[in-house]
Image (cartoon, rainbow, N blue to C red):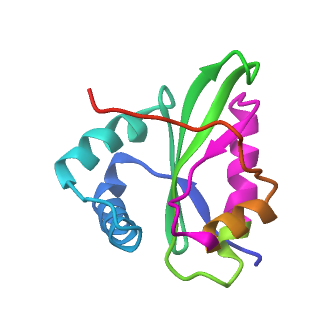
Amino acid sequence: MRGVQIRRATPTDLSALLTLVGEFYRADHHHYDEQRVIRALEPLLVDDNYGQVWLFDTGYAVVTWSYSLESGGRDALVDEFYVRNRGRGVGGAVMRALLGKCREAGALKVFLETEEHNDAARRFYRRHGFEVERSTWLSREL
């Protein structure tokens, strides 16, 4: 798809983002705590220290930064990627643009995760060059 408009989100986009995040969380079966989402989004909307938020025609993407010796330095995590109207080429166009933005920001590797139930997302990401890692991520709340 040509002509997809993608732009950095700003603090004035918070309301629109909350609508999209709520839709994504419902679709992907995540618990939606609006105050928690706001606290996490706000620093991303003011500068690039932690990452970037992108808005596009029918969705949004959140990319965050980390640093890894295995990656050779800065890497990126596509933390959230939501396309409201799938199957029209928007996601592919946005993913290509996001990878370019990550490269421009100095990231050497890009990670992402999908929910176990989301086979369509894994197929999409594989079409865009992502490979399943053999490592297993573990997490815990602090």
Residue at x-position 57% and y-position 50%? 113
Task: Give the residues drawn in magenta, as a range.
Answer: 93-119
Residue at x-position 73% and y-position 67%? 93
> Horizontal and vertical percent for residue 100?
76, 46
Residue at x-position 73% and y-position 20%? 70
Does residue 52 show up magenta in the picture? no
> Horizontal and vertical percent for residue 9?
46, 51
Look at the image and tell me in which quarter the C terminus lies: top left
72 vs 35, left or right, is right
Residue reaching furthest to the top: 69
Look at the image and tell me in which quarter the N terminus lies: bottom right
Q: Is residue 111 above or below residue 98?
A: above
127 vs 52, left or right, is right
Determine the image quadrant of residue 75: top right
Residue at x-position 50% and y-position 60%? 115
Q: Nearer the viewer, residue 110 or 94?
A: 110
Determine the image quadrant of residue 127: bottom right
130 vs 81, left or right, is right
